[in-house]
Image: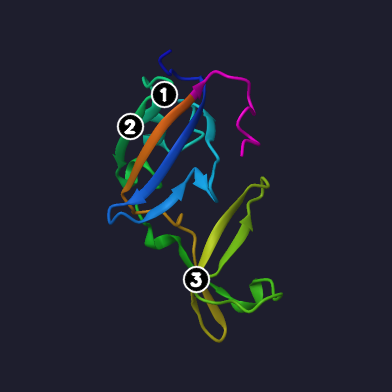
Amino acid sequence: MVIKKGDLIAVNYEGRFEDGEVFDSSSREGHEHPLEFTAGIGQVVQGFDKAVLGMEKGQEKEFTLKPEEAYGEYNPQLQQKVRRDQLPNDQEPEVGMTIIAKTPDGSQFPIQITAVEKDEITLDMNHPLAGKTLIFKIKILDVNYEKGKYAHKH
């Protein structure tokens, strides 16, 4: 069965940077944790979504995504300085720390602290993978199965 838009699929994957460093994988702590999503409807980044279309159960593939097909180019305008007192004061801010922001619709996204000064903090709202070329190696495990089949597999 060839994967088409709207098919529920389970994928094992490994994502790495051009230098070979692995940034994410469905294999963690000796267990497989497949990625489940509906193909072709934007639940994953554009290039990943397009890559699975036309594949079949059991098929493996390796592909490279340029930033515009993944998390976009790095945008310096998404860095912003805020007064230190605008952040929760339950812990001391540090460079590299990630805080979670909530949008008015209730969704959440990570923001990284890139500079800490006496009165101001610089926040970077770019996705951590923005501006990066990503290489994925994937294997299609299943197509159009009972949703949640892989949710608790160990």
Q: How many marks?
A: 3
Q: Which residue is mark 2?
A: 61
Q: Secondary structure at mark 3?
A: loop
Considering every residue shown, the one lying at the far bottom of the view is 118
Three-letter amino acid code of the residue under disc 3:
Gly
Amino acid carrying label 1: it is Gly
Residue at screen point 49% across, 59% down: 125
Horizontal and vertical percent for residue 69? 35, 40
Task: Please say whether residue 74 is one of the residues in the magenta stretch.
Answer: no
Q: Residue 100: x and y, percent?
A: 61, 59
Of pointers 2 and 3, the one earlier in the residue sequence: 2
- What secondary structure is found at the residue carrying circle 1? loop
- Mark 2 or 1: the one toward you: 1
Residues tagged 3 and 1 counted as in contact (Cβ below 8 A) = no
Instruction: Measure how far apart labels 2 and 1 are at the Cα level.
Output: 10 Å
Most common secondary structure along the magenta stretch: loop
Colouring chosen for the image of the structure:
rainbow
Q: Are marks 2 and 3 in contact (CB under 8 Å)?
A: no
Residue 56 in the image, given as x and y percentages of width and height? 40, 19
Q: Which residue is mark 1?
A: 58
Residue at point 42%, 53% (across, down) = 23
Residue bounds of the magenta highlight: 142-154
Task: Tell me, yes or no, if residue 72 can be seen here.
Answer: no
| Of 153 and 9, the residue lying toward us | 153
